[in-house]
Image: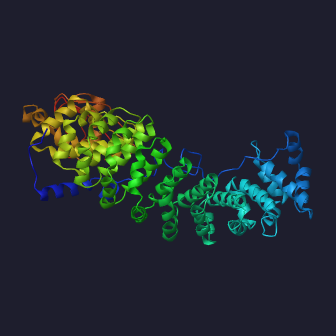
Amino acid sequence: LFFGFTMSDHVNNTRILHFKNKGRNADELRRRRTDMSFELRKSKREDTLSKKRSIHVQSVEIDEATTSVLRDSNGLLMILQNAQSPDPIVQLNAVQQARKLLSSDRNPPIDDLIRSGILPVLVNCLGPHNSPELQFEAAWALTNIASGTSEQTKAVVHSGAVPLFLQLLQSPHMNVCEQAVWALGNIIGDGPHFRDYCIELGIIDPLLEFIKREVPIGFLRNVAWVIVNLCRSKEPPPSALTISKLLPALSVLVHHPDMSVLVDTVWALSYLTDGGNDQIQMVIDAGVVPKLVQLLNHREVKVQAAALRAVGNIVTGSDEQTQVVLNCEALSYMPELLAHQKEKINKEAVWFLSNITAGNREQVQAVINAGLIPTIIKLLEKSDFATQKEAAWAISNVTISGQREEVAFMVSQGVIPAMCSQLNSRDVQVVQVILDGLNNILKMAGDEVEVITQQIEDCGGLDHIETLQTHENEEIYKLAYEILDKYFTDDDDLMGGNSEEIISFDKCNHEFLSLMSSIQKEGPLPFGLAFSFCSITHSPFGKMTVSFARCHRPGFFLSTPGSRFPVNSTVELDRSN
């Protein structure tokens, strides 16, 4: 379909500029994730937790009855007093009891312990004059307090714990270092304010030293998790200096064989690529893109999801940044991802492709050459709603970024019925994106526009577009009218074969409305011509007026002063304009 005609480069450029100004400019074509259901939040999702509570207890635990006694006010007071005992054994046992209470699965009494006044005591136990056993137990207890709410984390920070945790990173005892890392991770995970506070106090350099040292794998997993928390927030994002320090470490860890370390590392890179083009470029310059692309076919879904998010964020950048991903053969991994058993992977893959089709013509053609358009069309027609929405963007972007040949190929693959199937969507954005795409296709069709209009009519799309003339969204009903007025008007049908059977109204809107209302009540027009009127509809938009629309068969007619109506047609009064 319409493969044969050509356009000059000047006409092509003019067309693209015209279309991009039709509600969506070039910057809006590529979409960073803002309101989508796969959005990463500081919550318990499949990626990584921002806070973790340590509940593994190596020593013999206190039984439930003893726990109940310790939870009451007298028990907590006893723990507080003993934790300040000059006897190191009594002191250690008391801090252990506090830690065990905080490690219990059932409602740890964090607030009760905070109110008891134990925080300054625990922080004092972190000091260098204490035994490593006491430092470890106190750090563990504080770790679990910091794993709670923001207020509970704030209480730990305000008690002066952070500088002492940073000192413990230099401890010769590995378990003490690891527990301090864990505690700092919970504090950083609370948000950018405490993240920046820890960075200002100097956490980055000693933290990254553990990557160079031979540390147990559990310790390294915690280090990778803290790095994720350092990268996580983008309001505001970490500074360029911080990112420049973290990227060399991430470039090493992205090749690590441990699954937990790998997942956290890739999520960290995905967070960094979600911070704008400058951060995207820093990640590209770190040389990790080829590895991220390779991870798209990893056996673990968690790794695939993280890698797909990372490369998906990169292609929200400039055409040049997008090309870096394409040069790594990323499109070759898409067929498997589009057919993945996990719907969220399907959606992420289509989102990725929608940002490729928002690029330059060569990038659009790359998607076509990879054989992905038919699959996108199928997903637009039948898949879960979130994937369909991404597919609508991917297809519509081709009609803007591509040229006639690319759009013709989509038409040949059955894109028109698939697009029209979404015109009755309850999602306003989907309907608008589809209408934009159809309008662009019709504009490019040239002499073969009737082929496209026939396809739209044959699949029921015309009925949907006519219905959309009464849509409550202004952009949608105006675009629906524009399409009908320009491409579905039959002048012969409009004139009824007899130009004398046309009534012209030259009244203002108010007078015309009054006349129409009286006709509704009184029946036949005083002119003796047979008009049929539907009921007056009311819409919450603007003042009651009558606007004009033509169609090739009896349907909805809206009018302005001076408009002419064919006989035996239907008129609807509307407050749209």
Q: Quadrant of residue 460?
A: top left
Left or right: residue 454 versus residue 228 is left
Residue that sits furthest to the front in the current view: 214
Left or right: residue 382 versus residue 270 is left
Left or right: residue 2 versus residue 174 is left
Q: Residue at x 39, y 51 (%)?
A: 293
Give coordinates of residue 173: x percent, y percent: 72, 62
Figure check: 286 above or below 419: below
Count of marks, rendered view: 0
Left or right: residue 137 versus residue 154 is right
Give coordinates of residue 220: x percent, y percent: 60, 56
Give coordinates of residue 546: x percent, y percent: 27, 43
Does residue 510 appear anywhere in the picture? no
Q: Quadrant of residue 447?
A: top left
Figure check: 61 above or below 149: above
Give coordinates of residue 361: x percent, y percent: 22, 53
Q: Residue at x 55, y 57 (%)?
A: 228
User: Which of 562/428 is in front?
Assistant: 428
User: Which of 399/70 is in front?
Assistant: 70
Q: Quadrant of residue 348?
A: top left
Does residue 216 appear anywhere in the picture? yes
